[in-house]
Amino acid sequence: MSEEIRGSRATEAFFGRRKGKALRERQVDVMEHLLPALRIDPKSPPVTDLAGLFPHPVERIRLEIGFGGGEHLAHRAQEEPATGFIGVEPFVNSMAKLLASVRDLGLNNIRVFDDDATFLLDWLPAGSIDQIDLLYADPWPKRKHWKRRFVSQVNLERFHRVLKPGGVFCFASDIDTYVNWTLQHCSRHGGFAWTARNASDWLTPYAGWPGTRYEAKAKREGRSSAYLTFRRV
C-alpha cells in the first residue's frame, strides 16, 4: 500500500450511518446465513484470480460500489450470468435487501463486501476488474464535506490499479456539482479517457439500464442525470 493511500485512512469517511430501521425476520436470516457465505474478507491472503471466488466459471468481473438496495446489481447479475459481480455496501439494511434478492432469484454470480470499499480495492489484484460502477453515490453537497466524495485522486489511483487495461469506470449522478467534480478529477488524473463524443452519450442511460430509486427521485424533483463512462488508459 502506498504512503499516499495509507495516509488517507485518517480522513476517509465516505458513508454515513451503518444501520436504519430494525430488520425483518427474513432479512435477519439472510444476514446471519447468506452474508458469511458470500462475503469477501480483505484480511484474507490476496488472490490472483478473482474468478475463483465464484462457483461457476465467469468471463468478466464487475465491481459496484455503494449498491443501495441492490436493484441495479441484481438486475445486472441476472442479465449477465457469465459475469462475476462484487457489490460493496456498508449500510446494513441495504445489504439485507440485496441478499434477499440473491436468495429469491437464485443468483450465484454475486459476492459482497459490507465495509469501506477502499479496504477491498487495496486487497484486489492489479488489473483484475473489467468494470467499476459508482452510481448515485452520496454527493456530500456541502462544500465542507466535498473531501468525503468517493471520487478523489487517491481513489481514482485505486481504480486505475485494479482495472484491466481498457476497463471502464461508470459514474451516474443527478448532482451537477458532483458530475463536474468527477470530470475534473478524471481529467486531472490522466489515466481515464472520457468516452463521450456528444451530449447524448452522457445524457442517455447505459444500455440495459433498469433505473434506480435514486434516479426516480431525481426525476420527481425535476433533476436530470448524467451517465459518464471513462476508459482506463
Image: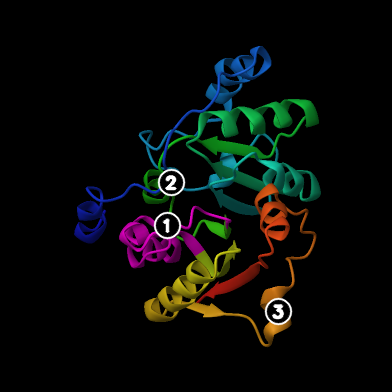
Dots 3, 2 in contact, CB < 8 A = no
Query: What colour scheme does the image use?
Result: rainbow
Question: Helix or strand or loop: what does disc 2 sit on?
Answer: helix
Q: Which mark is residue 117?
A: 2
The residue beneath circle 1 is 150
Residue sitting at the far front: 221
Q: Is residue 177 magenta?
A: no
Upstream in the sequence, badge 3 or badge 1?
Answer: 1
Q: Are marks 1 and 2 in contact (CB under 8 Å)?
A: yes
- Could you tell me residue 210's position as x and y percent? 78, 53
Height in image: 113 above or below 221?
Answer: above
Q: Nearer the viewer, residue 221 or 99?
A: 221
For disc 3, the marked residue is 201
> Residue at the spot x=65%, y=33% of the render?
98
Task: Kindly identify the amino acid type of the residue bearing the numbered disc 1.
Answer: Phe
Q: Nearer the viewer, residue 154 or 191?
A: 154
Question: Quarter-wise, where is residue 132 in the image?
Answer: bottom right
Q: Nearer the viewer, mark 3 or mark 2?
A: 3
